[in-house]
Image: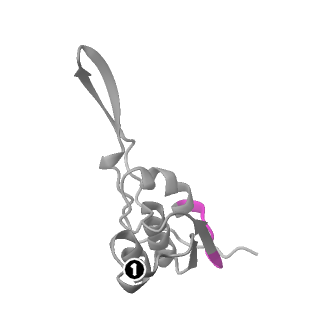
Amino acid sequence: RRRSLVVDVRLPPPSAVTRTQVRGREFLIKRDDELRLGGEQGAGIGGNKARKLLSFALHGPTTGVVASMGGHQSNAMVAIAALCRARGLKFFFLAKPVPRWLRKHPSGNFARGLAL
């Protein structure tokens, strides 16, 4: 049976669309860089990860373990780890073997993910 949880995620407004011209051609640019999932459960995630993970933030599991697979420096890994931490879930990230140099000197998103 699924446990109910009050989820505090402030919904971001829809992504703005900016019109711009390059070499006489008009382009519409979706501004996901301006998105941010606010609130305690939103974990401050921004950009396209906010749009992609909104459903998980609102309707994801409230108990258990979440697993994901990706690269060592994955932005998604950090975003999912932050959401899991905010929800009190265990998170396992699956990747190819981590290079020895990165294990010895964690940096970038790999270090951020380990800190969560």
Question: Looking at the image, is 19 positioned above or below residue 32?
Answer: above
Image location (x, y in percent) of residue 20: 25, 25
Please say if 27 is above or below 35. above
Is residue 49 shown above or below 115?
A: above
Rendered-image quadrant of the C terminus: bottom left
Whether 77 is among the magenta residues is no
Q: Is residue 63 magenta?
A: yes
Residue 82 at x, y = what percent? 44, 72
Looking at numbered disc 1 in the image, what kind of residue is underneath it? Trp
In the rendered view, does 12 fall on the left or right side of 20? right
**Quick check: 40 left or right of 92?**
left
Residue 116 visible in the picture: no
**Label 1: which secondary element:** helix
Residue 78 horizontal/vertical position (percent) = 43, 68
Bounds of the magenta segment: 58-65
Q: Main secondary structure of the magenta part?
A: loop
Work out whether residue 13 or residue 95 is closer to the camera in this orientation and state it: 95
The residue indicated by pointer 1 is: 101
Residue at x 61%, y 72% (from the top left corner): 66
- Residue 64 is at least partly visible in this image: yes
Q: State the residue at coordinates (47%, 76%).
A: 99
What residue lies at 48% left-to-right and 72% top-to-bottom?
Answer: 81
Specify the farthest residue to the bottom.
104
Q: Residue at x 43, y 55 (%)?
A: 50
Residue 43, image quadrant:
bottom left
